[in-house]
Image: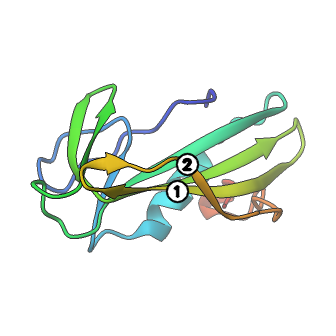
Amino acid sequence: MNVGTYIGLPQKRTGRCMSSFAIAGRCGIASVLCLLAASVSLSHAAEHRFSLLLDTDNVAATGCTVSTADGPVSGIERIATAVVATTPTTATVARLEQQICAGGTLSAVTTYDAGGWSAGLGNGTGGAAAI
Protein backbone atom coordinates (compact mmCIF):
# COMPACT_ATOMS: atom_id res chain seq x y z
CA MET A 1 0.00 0.00 0.00
CA ASN A 2 1.39 3.41 -0.90
CA VAL A 3 1.50 6.31 1.53
CA GLY A 4 -1.79 8.19 1.55
CA THR A 5 -3.95 5.44 0.07
CA TYR A 6 -6.87 3.82 1.82
CA ILE A 7 -8.74 0.56 1.45
CA GLY A 8 -12.47 0.83 0.78
CA LEU A 9 -15.08 -0.94 2.90
CA PRO A 10 -18.85 -0.73 2.61
CA GLN A 11 -20.32 2.28 4.34
CA LYS A 12 -23.18 1.23 6.62
CA ARG A 13 -25.70 3.88 5.48
CA THR A 14 -25.37 3.40 1.72
CA GLY A 15 -23.69 0.05 1.19
CA ARG A 16 -21.32 1.51 -1.38
CA CYS A 17 -17.55 1.15 -1.12
CA MET A 18 -15.65 4.11 0.26
CA SER A 19 -11.98 4.93 -0.23
CA SER A 20 -11.78 5.74 3.48
CA PHE A 21 -13.52 4.04 6.37
CA ALA A 22 -16.94 5.14 7.55
CA ILE A 23 -17.54 3.19 10.72
CA ALA A 24 -20.96 3.26 12.35
CA GLY A 25 -21.38 2.63 16.06
CA ARG A 26 -22.03 -1.11 15.67
CA CYS A 27 -19.17 -1.98 13.30
CA GLY A 28 -16.14 -3.80 14.69
CA ILE A 29 -13.12 -1.51 14.72
CA ALA A 30 -10.85 -4.44 15.58
CA SER A 31 -11.85 -6.16 12.33
CA VAL A 32 -11.12 -3.03 10.35
CA LEU A 33 -7.70 -2.62 11.96
CA CYS A 34 -6.88 -6.24 11.15
CA LEU A 35 -7.75 -5.62 7.49
CA LEU A 36 -5.66 -2.47 7.50
CA ALA A 37 -2.67 -4.19 9.01
CA ALA A 38 -2.91 -7.01 6.50
CA SER A 39 -2.50 -4.54 3.66
CA VAL A 40 0.76 -2.93 4.81
CA SER A 41 3.46 -3.27 2.16
CA LEU A 42 6.93 -3.66 3.61
CA SER A 43 8.92 -3.37 0.38
CA HIS A 44 10.70 -0.15 1.45
CA ALA A 45 11.07 2.19 4.41
CA ALA A 46 8.12 4.56 4.62
CA GLU A 47 5.29 5.91 6.75
CA HIS A 48 1.84 4.56 6.00
CA ARG A 49 -1.35 6.23 7.25
CA PHE A 50 -4.48 4.20 7.98
CA SER A 51 -7.50 6.41 8.67
CA LEU A 52 -10.91 5.54 10.06
CA LEU A 53 -13.80 7.91 9.43
CA LEU A 54 -16.04 7.58 12.48
CA ASP A 55 -19.74 8.39 12.37
CA THR A 56 -20.25 7.93 16.09
CA ASP A 57 -23.97 8.79 16.19
CA ASN A 58 -24.89 7.11 12.87
CA VAL A 59 -26.62 10.29 11.65
CA ALA A 60 -25.44 11.66 8.30
CA ALA A 61 -26.92 15.11 9.03
CA THR A 62 -24.52 15.74 11.95
CA GLY A 63 -20.73 15.94 11.94
CA CYS A 64 -18.46 16.95 9.09
CA THR A 65 -18.30 16.06 5.41
CA VAL A 66 -15.00 14.47 4.39
CA SER A 67 -13.83 14.23 0.78
CA THR A 68 -12.72 10.80 -0.44
CA ALA A 69 -11.75 9.42 -3.84
CA ASP A 70 -15.31 8.01 -4.11
CA GLY A 71 -16.95 11.30 -3.21
CA PRO A 72 -17.96 13.09 -0.01
CA VAL A 73 -18.87 11.20 3.18
CA SER A 74 -21.25 13.04 5.51
CA GLY A 75 -21.76 12.69 9.25
CA ILE A 76 -18.16 12.15 10.35
CA GLU A 77 -17.52 13.14 13.98
CA ARG A 78 -13.91 11.93 14.25
CA ILE A 79 -11.04 10.74 12.09
CA ALA A 80 -8.63 8.35 13.82
CA THR A 81 -5.34 7.59 12.06
CA ALA A 82 -2.65 5.01 12.78
CA VAL A 83 0.74 6.04 11.34
CA VAL A 84 2.90 2.96 10.73
CA ALA A 85 6.63 3.24 9.97
CA THR A 86 7.96 0.34 7.91
CA THR A 87 11.32 -1.00 6.80
CA PRO A 88 11.91 -4.10 4.66
CA THR A 89 11.83 -6.24 7.84
CA THR A 90 9.83 -4.34 10.51
CA ALA A 91 6.65 -2.36 11.03
CA THR A 92 6.15 -0.10 14.05
CA VAL A 93 3.18 2.06 15.01
CA ALA A 94 4.80 5.51 15.03
CA ARG A 95 1.82 7.38 16.52
CA LEU A 96 -1.96 7.60 16.66
CA GLU A 97 -3.57 10.82 15.44
CA GLN A 98 -7.07 12.25 15.44
CA GLN A 99 -9.20 15.05 14.10
CA ILE A 100 -12.49 15.99 15.76
CA CYS A 101 -15.45 17.67 14.09
CA ALA A 102 -16.87 20.70 15.89
CA GLY A 103 -19.39 23.06 14.31
CA GLY A 104 -19.04 21.37 10.91
CA THR A 105 -15.25 21.83 10.78
CA LEU A 106 -12.53 19.25 11.42
CA SER A 107 -9.84 20.25 13.92
CA ALA A 108 -6.14 20.21 13.16
CA VAL A 109 -4.45 16.82 13.46
CA THR A 110 -3.39 16.02 17.04
CA THR A 111 -1.38 13.07 18.34
CA TYR A 112 -3.18 11.16 21.09
CA ASP A 113 -0.69 8.29 21.51
CA ALA A 114 3.05 8.25 20.83
CA GLY A 115 2.96 4.67 19.54
CA GLY A 116 6.22 2.75 19.55
CA TRP A 117 4.88 -0.81 19.53
CA SER A 118 5.45 -3.45 16.89
CA ALA A 119 2.81 -3.97 14.26
CA GLY A 120 3.15 -7.74 14.81
CA LEU A 121 4.41 -9.05 11.50
CA GLY A 122 2.90 -12.47 10.85
CA ASN A 123 0.74 -12.36 14.01
CA GLY A 124 -2.56 -11.49 12.34
CA THR A 125 -5.16 -13.72 10.72
CA GLY A 126 -3.63 -15.98 8.10
CA GLY A 127 -0.12 -14.71 8.87
CA ALA A 128 -0.94 -11.07 8.08
CA ALA A 129 0.48 -8.18 10.09
CA ALA A 130 -1.57 -6.86 13.03
CA ILE A 131 -1.54 -3.30 14.37
How many numbered marks does the figure carry? Answer: 2
Q: Quadrant of residue 68?
A: top left
Pick the residue in front: 58 or 86: 58
Q: Which element is circle 1 on?
A: strand
Q: Is residue 15 left or right of residue 47?
A: left
- Amino acid carrying mark 2 in the image: Val
Residue at image position (60%, 49%) is 38
Estimate how packed mark 2 is, as few (under 14), some (14 to 19) or many (20 or more) residues with alpha carbons within 10 Å: few
Give the distance between the C-alpha atoms of the residues marked 2 and 1, in whole angstroms.
6 Å
Position of residue 30 relative to residue 79, above or below, is below
Give the x, y percent position of residue 93. Answer: 75, 56
Tell me which label, 2 or 1, sits earlier in the chain. Answer: 1
Q: Quadrant of residue 39?
A: top right
Q: Is residue 107 left or right of residue 67?
A: right
Tag 2 and tag 1, C-beta contact below 8 Å: yes
Q: Residue furthest front?
A: 103
Q: Which element is circle 2 on?
A: loop
Q: Which residue is mark 1?
A: 98
Q: Which residue is mark 2?
A: 109
Residue at image position (55%, 60%) is 34
Identify the image quadrant of the C terminus: bottom right
Give the x, y percent position of residue 82. Answer: 61, 53
Q: Specify the label residue 23 is tagged with.
A: none
